[in-house]
Amino acid sequence: MVAQQKKPHTFCETLIKPSILKAVEIVLGEESKRKVSQISLSDNTIKRRIDELALDIQNQLIHKLKNSVFFAIQCDESTDVANCCQLLVYCRFINEKTIAEELMFSQALSSTSKGSDVLSAIDIFFDQNGLSWKNVVGVCTDGAPAMLGSRSGFVKLAKDKNPSIIGSHCVIHRQALAAKTLPFEIKNLLEVCIKIVNTIKSSALNSRLFKILCSELSAQHSVLLFHTEVRWLSKGNMLERLYELKSEVEIMLLQLGKDDLRENFTDENFTFYFAYLADFFETINNLNLKLQGRNINVIIANDTINSFLEKIQLWKRRVNKETPNFSSFRRLNELLSDEEEPFCPTGLKDIVIKHLDSLTDEFTRYFPNFSNKSWQYMLTSSPFSTNVDTLPDIIQEQAIELKNDSRAKIDFNSGSSLEEFWVKYQPIYPEISNEALKVLVQFSSTYLCESGFSSMAVIKNKYRNRLDVASDLRCSLSNIEPNIKKLSKEKCCQH
């Protein structure tokens, strides 16, 4: 419970044990309280028990991995509060009736964090637990050179172990990179917005005065938001908040005497471009959120990106009409609708078209394989409508058997997930199911590693910067329940 809630190990001694003693004293009396008080719940005791629970969870995970025909991994490294480089490795594998995701292990890298260091750490874990690279079908990482380097990157070294491994770059990182390209005019506008936010937020006095101003004007919010390049959603959130507090910001800039910024901010053309920019980043944020989360397989990620690319073409067709249609952009459309006569600022249409063209080019560059669907993709997502002639000879006959299996067709259309369907029919159609499961078991992003680092920041904070977080992380992040009865029985036998 302490590890799952990410609490300090002293939590039991300082809060839980006194609460238990108080309850025992009330219910059973002073003598029982004295006996219970002799039970040790010290820091070392809690740490030892967390280690035992973590080891039991790890043993269960290894057993599941060995029973899975193959599995995929995602890995990433980050520096913690004590300047220690921490490596997280997650695995995705076939488990009973579906595909599961679990933390494989976490480990501190003592020196450098090169691809060879990451490979060495995973190699040691595999050797200690009887796992093989032959069963690994996919590796997903971020875009760092240490991971994707063509000569000494981790993915290249992993493929040396098993040439059939599919290496992939996190789809969320690629989406964030593709969305960064902006036309010169819009980029300048974004820089002005950032300057305005920094002018108010960088001074404690200005922040307090702005908060008072918002309170007096009964604004929905009272603070602006910073943005940072390394956070996926922050830029969109910053622009959204700035747009919502536009009137209050104008007054604040007037009070601060920032006439140059205020003139830009109140310019009519700037207002329309600003509305478009806020709408665009809101759309990007929504796309980003769809790609996040657990159990997002490559089919879902592929469909999400293809859907977004098709939306871009729709927006271009709408804007490119003789009378531009900006209905896809909520704030901009509201501004234009408020005008008494149909009105479009000079150059707005051309800039939007230019931006959407560059956005299409960037997404096509970062997702080159998403427009052409392979036979593996078609087989996995639509097994009953796949052209058998496009499949390898070895699975064509089994594909025909599956297409004419009415029971399988009913199960496929019953609403169960792709993972559940293919795992269910793996014993009946092993060759064709394995091809589909090799696709579904792949990670599409490093989302689990990123969320794991967030948990690590809570567990290993500045007050506990010497803590070895491996066991606490496993107990906190794992979906596998430790076998408490088995551990208790072993303890009884030891005593």
Image (tube, rainbow, N blue to C red):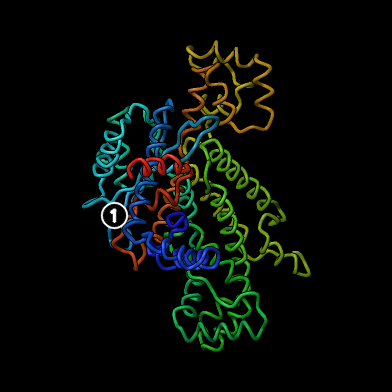
* Residue type, numbered disc 1: Cys
Q: Is residue 436 left or right of residue 107?
A: right
Q: Is residue 387 left or right of residue 192?
A: right
Picture coordinates of residue 307 (x, y %)? 60, 42
Q: Quadrant of the C terminus?
A: top left
For label 1, the crowd category at 10 Å Cα-Cα, with few meaning under 14, some 14 to 19 and many 20 or more, is some
Picture coordinates of residue 413 (x, y %)? 68, 27
Residue shown at 47% from the left, 68% from the top: 30
Q: Work out whether 218 lies above or below 93.
A: below
Picture coordinates of residue 217 (x, y %)? 66, 83
Q: Work out whether 142 lies above or below 388.
A: below
The count of marks equals 1
Residue shown at 65% from the left, 14% from the top: 404
Q: Residue furthest right?
A: 340
Q: Quadrant of residue 425?
A: top right
Picture coordinates of residue 123 (x, y %)? 27, 36
Q: Work out whether 178 lies above or below 229.
A: above
Query: Is residue 351 shown to the viewer in this render?
Result: no
Q: Nearer the viewer, residue 265 or 303?
A: 303
Residue position marked by numbered label 1 in the rendering? 85
Residue shown at 59% from the left, 13% from the top: 400
Q: Is residue 486 left or right of residue 299?
A: left
Q: Nearer the viewer, residue 436 or 63?
A: 63
Q: Nearer the viewer, residue 118 or 256?
A: 118
Q: Residue furthest left?
A: 111
Q: Residue furthest front?
A: 31
Q: Residue furthest top?
A: 397
Q: SS at mark 1?
A: strand
Query: Is residue 183 shown to the viewer in this render?
Result: yes
